Image (cartoon, helix red, strand yellow):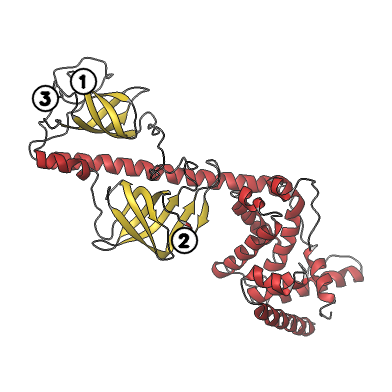
Amino acid sequence: MTIDDTTLPSALRDLAASVPDDPSRLTSVHRRAARAHRRRRAVGAGAIAATMAATVAGAEVLVSSQHGRAPIAAASGGSPSTPGPALAACPPPPPPDQASKSAAAVPMTPPAIGGQFTAGGTITSPGTATSVTVRVDMGPLDGSTLTLAVTPASKVFLSGPTPDAPEVTASSTQLQTGEGAKFIATRTGTASYNLDELHSGAAAGSDTRAPAKQAGAPQGPPTPPAIGGPFKIAGTGVSSTGDSITVNVTGGNLSGTVTLTLKCQPPQHVAGDTVEAGGTRTGADTYVADVVIVTPATP
Amino acid sequence: MVLPLEVDDPPSALHFDTYVHARSGALLRLAFLLTGDAHHAEDLVQTTLVKVMGRWEQVTAGGDPHAYVRKVLLHTALGWRRRRWHGERPSDPLPDVGGSPDQTAVIDSRERLRRALLQLPARQRAAVVLRHYEDLSEQDVARELGCSVGTVKSQTARGLDRLRSLMSDEP
C-alpha cells in the first residue's frame, strides 16, 4: 500500500469508518455528567459542613479558654419547649477589651504551618497565573485578605452558566474581582498559603453553591441550614427567658428574628445587647445554641 | 470533513442532544484515528461531550460548536497521551475474517495504517489527521494545535514520510 497526499485521505476515511458506533452514547454522556455533578455537589456540601463545624468548634474552644466565661450549658434531652430544671446562670460578658476582640476573634483558628484549611470569601483582585487574592469571610482567618499561591497542583473550578450546570475546570487567570469563592489551601509559612482547590461562582447571583458574599452586590436572605445542620449568627438581643434568648439576626446563616434554646440562664435584660451564637437547627423554627456570647451594649 | 447538520435550527439554538446525534459519529471517527483504539475513542468522545455539555450555551453562542468541540477532543486526547500508557496493542496475528481475499486485503491495509499511525508522535499524528482526514487548511490546523503554520507544515511532512516508511516496511 502506497501512501501519498492523494491516497492518504481516502485511506484514513476508510480506517475511520471501520470503528463501530455506539447507539447509547447520549445516554452514557448524560449519565456521566450527572455522576460528575453529584460528585461535585457532594464535595461542595462536605466543604461547607466542614467549614461550619470548624467555625463552631473554634468558637467553643476560644470561649472556654477565656477567663470568667464559659459556654452556656446544654439543654439536655426533651423538646426545647419542655420546662426543665433551673439552669445555671450564663457566664458574665467578657471585659470590654476582650469583648471588642471577640467578634473578630471567634472564627480565628489559624491553621498550623503545613496544615490544610477550608474557607470562603470574595476574590479581591483578578487572578494571575501565580496567585489569587481572597478576602476571607468564612472559616479560619476570617477577616483577613490572603494571597494564595497558585501551583501546578492547584485546581480551579468555575460554576456553570446556570445554578444547575456542573462546574468547569478553569485557570486562576479566569478569576474575577468580586466573585465568591470557596477554597482549600495549605499554610506554608507565617503569611504564605498554597492554593489546593478553589470553587468560584461565575456571574453574580448565578452560583447558589458559593456561600461567600458577593462584594458590593445586594445580598439576598441567607440560606438557613437543614434541620440537624449547624448555624452561626450574630445579632442584637431582643428578649430572654429562663432558657432562651430571642435575637434579631444581622449576620450569619439565619435571618430575621429567631429564638434560641440555651444551655444556661441568660441575663434578664438582653435588649440591644450584641449576641453571637452557634449551634444546631433542631426543627423548622427551633434552634439549640451550644455557644452564646452576650456582650452588653455600650451605655 | 464536516457532516451536514440534520436540523434547521440556527447553531445558537442547537440542542446538545441534537448535536450528539448529528455529530458524535464524526467525533468518534476522529477520535479513533487519534487513539487507534475503538474503546479509547468512545471514552474520549464521551469525556469531551461531558466537558462541553456543562457550558453548552457558551459553546453554541459563537456559532457552530463543532470546531470548538473538536478542539476540546483534540486537546483531551493530547492530554491523555501525557498520563496514560498508550503503547501499541498486540494485534498479531490479524484476525481471521474468513472473507474473500479482497476483503482480507482491505482489512489488512487498514490495520497496517492504524498501526503506522500509532507509531507517529501524538502531535505529528494529530497534524496529519487534521490536515488529511479533517481536510483543514494549514492555518486551521495551526490554530487547532496552538502552533505556527511552519510547524504544521514540518509535522505533516515528517508524519507523511514516516507513514510511507512504516507502510513500506510492513510485509
Q: Chain of mark 3?
A: A
Q: In the rendered view of the protein, which quadrant contains the C terminus of chain B?
A: bottom right
Which numbered circle lies on residue A89?
A: 3
Q: Classify mark 1: helix, strand or loop.
A: strand
Image position, residue B39 (x, y; %): 68, 59
Give the position of the N terminus of chain B as an image quadrant: bottom right
Count of number-bearing discs: 3
Give residue A239's mark.
Answer: 1
Looking at the image, tell me whether mark 3 or mark 1 is earlier in sequence order.
3
Residue B93 visible within the image: no
Residue wearing tag 2: A173
Of circles 3 and 1, the one toward us is 1
Q: Is residue B122 above or below residue A63?
A: below
Q: Amino acid at mark 1?
A: Ser
Task: Kindly identify which numbered label has been placed on residue A102.
Answer: none
- Residue type, label 2: Thr
**Does the CB distance between marks 2 and 1 fall below 8 Å?**
no
Q: Which element is circle 2 on?
A: helix
Q: CA distance from mark 3 to mark 2?
A: 54 Å
- Between B106 and A272, the one nearer to me in the picture: A272
Q: Residue furthest top?
A: A83
Residue B102 in sight here: yes
Compared with B3, A254 (above or below) is above
Q: In the displayed structure, would residue B123 be above or below residue A40?
A: below
